[in-house]
Image (cartoon, coloured by chain):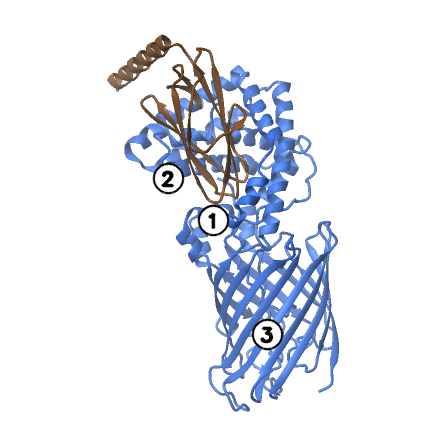
Chain colours: A brown, B blue
Amino acid sequence: MHRVDSLTYVGAPNEAVTLSTRVNGGGQITVTLDGQPIQPNSTFPLPAAPGGHRALQIGLFGPIGASCAVGIATVDGGTDGDFLVCQPHTPAPTHNYSFTVAAQAAINAFRQLKSGATAKKRGGQ
Amino acid sequence: MSTRVLVALVLLGLSSTPALGQGAPPPPKAAPAAPAAPATTQPVNDRSQVILEMVKAGDAAAAAAVGSAPFATTFGAGREEHIVAYLIAFHSERPGYRALLDLMEARVDTQVGASSSSAGSTSLASKGLVPDILGFAVEHGAVNENISGTTVTFRATPAGIVSALQGQGLLDTYASYAANPALRFASGFSAAASFDTSLGSSSGTFTATSKQLTSWAVRWQAVNGRDPSRAEYASQWKTSAPKQAYDDATIAVNAKLSTVPEFATWEKNLAGRVAQEVDGPWATDKNTPAAASKFQAILSTEMPKLEKIAFPDVVTAALDTLVSQLTIVENSAASIYSFIGKGQLLTFDWTTTRDVVLPDLYTATGIYETGLGAMRNTDMTLNVGVSMFRHVPTGATHAFKSVDVTTEFDHPLGSGAPSATLSFAARYSYLPNDSVASTGAAMTGTTSTTASTVATSPKGSIVVVQFKVTVPVKGSGVKIPLSVTASNRTELIKEKDVRASLGITFDLGTLLTALAPKK
């Protein structure tokens, strides 16, 4: 799976997505996948057909200072982190994650493209 | 001893915010909606506060080790809550926006005032609450010569002072409490000092000299059931979590924002700067303060550019819907905080009272507070204390003075806010030996009037009961208490016949948050 933008990912058909959450400060989270509640720490597959899409939503509600650290794996070989925190002007942060399925060939091409861009960036430094 | 019934009419100025437990974020009680005004005339504090919260969120994300780009987790597609908050603050002239912002910013705390034994106090029972930052109370006491004049009380938590010195506002301090168990424990301790400004060489002027110091106290909060992060309140947060309509409104705003090319360009530029100038260096050196500082500087430059973007009506409409939903969320949170604010408190207090003509009087008191009923509408306070002099005073036979038990019930009359409060309080004191008590005679300048300042207090039991109705004056922050006090003896009644008091109470914690320039 690869990150294409903030909270936006593209993966291969049937690729497994691992979600991990860690809540602190008395907050309570609500996690839904395509509108259905799921466990805060769970694994789910992407659709089998290219073009398929899954929508993950994590909402946090609690006292000021309550927080939730989120990990999405495997993204670009590691874990993509996210963070929600209840603050006076953001009392109930809700983050929406988008997962889109692309054909394996397209994923491979995208991987090479990202690898090349990363190598080029490092070489330029 | 004949029973005397005394009536007190007391005007007591109080700050307009409700009290809550120490270390607990206060309830976001609805503040009166400010009249609508163009955004350009609003103070920039709202927007500055949002920027500050973004920085704090990035800082917390870095501490939580959520990845190599913690500061980027505060904005971007799918997580625009801070951007939305900024836009709400900028468009505060729109209907409902200002009221929502006031709700968001109303999380302030108030708990100041002299202890029940101080000269200017109007209550029988002490409350176990402790101000979170620094409580500064000035209570102008009675006009009657038998009731001492002006008492100034400072009470502070060491942890709160440290936070204040670090430049943290009240809300930051609450967040620190939530994140740091050690700090939360330390915040259970507090100290207080009371000064009588009628004493000393500059009578009527607060000089904080030892001559004006009339008491000092230390307090430890053993149980704080008013911490909203406690596990016992998890179900309330869970069941009151935002509903589907809120989620839909959030998604809608995110979607509408993404359709505005100018906004997409702005956010892409912001993301680039944060990646290159904040998260990139942080990933290498892990210098979070430096990264946070740089992030704040970038936001201070970039966020105002949002104000120049002409958002289409669909974005504004989506924002309007979200504001409505956020207001529901805020009111839910307010209800939870209100309930939590009536949780159990168990506090131990040690007070040393100084007197010109008597030895220091030590008083150890246990204070228990809780809300009674399913909705905790009735406040119950119980004080149990023992008092003894530092040494046997002239005219007494023992240093031990008394055992005191006091209880108070406060019940709101009506469900509206503000509503009057009906209070009943009773005190039972047992003096095992003949003792003495200060009658609190006035002292002028440097010359203390020692004559008649000490009265014999024969051994036995003393009972005092008090009924009080406190009527708030809507929109003014002023409350008017009317009380009737009766006793079998008069030693414990502060009022003599009829008195009127006018007091002003400040909470510097509140002022610190409200008045300090936002970064």
Residue corresponding to mark 1? B173
**Considering depth in this image, is B205 or B352 the residue closer to the camera?**
B352
Residue B386 location (% of width, % of height)? 53, 77
Instruction: Tell me if residue B319 can be seen.
Output: yes
Give me the chain letter of mark 1. Answer: B
Residue corresponding to mark 2? B63
Q: Amino acid at mark 2?
A: Ala
Residue under disc 2 on the same chain as residue under disc 1: yes
Find out whether the residues at labels 2 and 3 contact each other: C-beta distance under 8 Å. no
Give me the chain letter of mark 3. Answer: B
> How far apart are the two marked residues, 3 and 1, measured between alpha carbons?
34 Å
Dot in front, 2 or 1: 2
Instruction: Find residue B313 and report its image quarter.
Output: top right
Query: In the rendered view of the protein, which quadrant contains the N terminus of chain B?
Result: bottom right
Instruction: Find residue B405 and report its image quarter.
Output: bottom right
Q: Residue at x 62, y 52 (%)?
A: B17
Residue B279 location (% of width, % of height)? 36, 29
- Classify residue A14 as left or right of residue B511: left
Circle 1 packing at 10 Å, graded few (<14), some (14-19), many (20+), is many
Q: Amino acid at mark 3?
A: Val
Residue A66 location (% of width, % of height)? 48, 42
Residue B213 location (% of width, % of height)? 51, 72
> How far apart are the two marked residues, 2 and 3, measured between alpha carbons?
47 Å
> How far apart are the two marked residues, 2 and 1, measured between alpha carbons?
17 Å
Give me the chain letter of mark 2. Answer: B
Residue under disc 3 on the same chain as residue under disc 1: yes
**Considering depth in this image, is B146 or B416 the residue closer to the camera?**
B416
Q: Earlier in the sequence, mark 3 or mark 1?
A: 1
Residue corresponding to mark 3? B405
**Considering depth in this image, is B307 or B489 the residue closer to the camera?**
B489
Residue B47's disc is: none
